[in-house]
Amino acid sequence: MSINTLFQFLTPKDKTFFPLFEQASSNLVLLALTLHEAVNLPVNERNELFLKIEELEQKGEEITRKTNLELSRNFITPFDREDIYSLITSIDNIAGNLNGAASRMKLYHVDKITKSIRKLTEINLEACQHIDIAVRELRSFKKIKNITDACTKINKLENKSDNVYDKAVAELFENENDAKNIIKYKEVLSVLESATDKCKSAASVLESISVKQS
């Protein structure tokens, strides 16, 4: 029996942090799903979903606040304190970027949704779903391969997002003559691509935790 396994056996089962992680990751998936649904709706049907995204992002911020508060209250944590902080912060950052994309679409009146925007929201949704899968394996650490597999898929999705973004920006500069349209569409594409970067950051944290606990 390894030292880490022995420590996990002797440490009381956590009833504070794992529920918060799972609340954060499930909230993130719902936010990403709502954004993907919004960009596939007619313009006059999006506002309600954009408002829901704002509410979900605020809910995520509250979960992050509670997690950090519990960190200050609890001496014993299920794994390294810095990893707990990094994990909950990385999830919060993803939510912030996805909400930022929705806000820009609404603020800049991005009425025509391009295939690239839809593809990036789809990639982000898939990446968030894999984050949720990995987060739910943290309770037991019995299937660490599920965590590493999810992280590998997230990294591949981030590479795919880069390619979609680069191609979309190139086409934007080639085909769009209105400078205002170039700016507003590039802003939306950039924030969506950044969200996938944040998913990769979350995957790095999850991989680090799994290595330390294996």
Image (cartoon, rainbow, N blue to C red):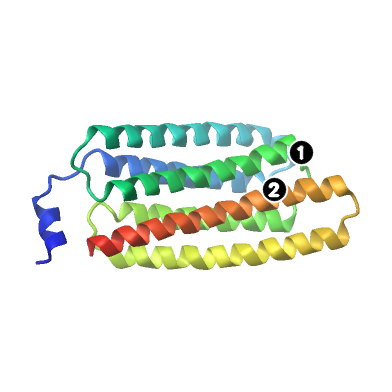
Residue on which the image places disc 2:
188
Tell me where residue 150 appears, x and y as whole percent: 41, 63
Q: The residue tagged with tag 2: helix, strand or loop?
A: helix
Tell me where residue 72 appears, x and y as whole percent: 28, 34
Tell me where residue 74 appears, x and y as whole percent: 22, 36
Q: Looking at the image, which is closer to me, 178 or 34?
A: 178
User: Compared with residue 201, is residue 66 higher up or lower down, i.e. above or below?
Assistant: above
Q: Looking at the image, which is closer to me, 86 or 30?
A: 86
User: Compared with residue 152, is residue 177 higher up or lower down, i.e. above or below?
Assistant: above
For residue 194, side relative to residue 110 (left or right):
left
Q: Quadrant of residue 88?
A: top left
Residue visible at 19% across and 38% down? 75
> Which residue is at the far right?
177
Residue visible at 48% across and 47% down? 29
- Say if mark 1 contacts mark 2, CB within 8 Å: yes
Q: From mark 1 to mark 2, how far is it between C-alphas?
A: 9 Å
Residue on which the image places disc 1:
108
Q: Looking at the image, which is closer to me, 29 or 214?
A: 214
Query: Looking at numbered disc 2 in the image, what kind of residue is underneath it?
Result: Val
Query: Looking at numbered disc 1 in the image, what kind of residue is underneath it?
Result: Tyr
Residue visible at 16% across and 45% down? 13
Crowd band around label 1 with a 10 angstrom C-alpha radius: few (<14), some (14–19), many (20+): some
The quarter of the picture where the N terminus appears is: bottom left
Query: Sequence-wise, which precedes: disc 1 or disc 2?
Result: 1
Residue visible at 28% across and 46% down? 81
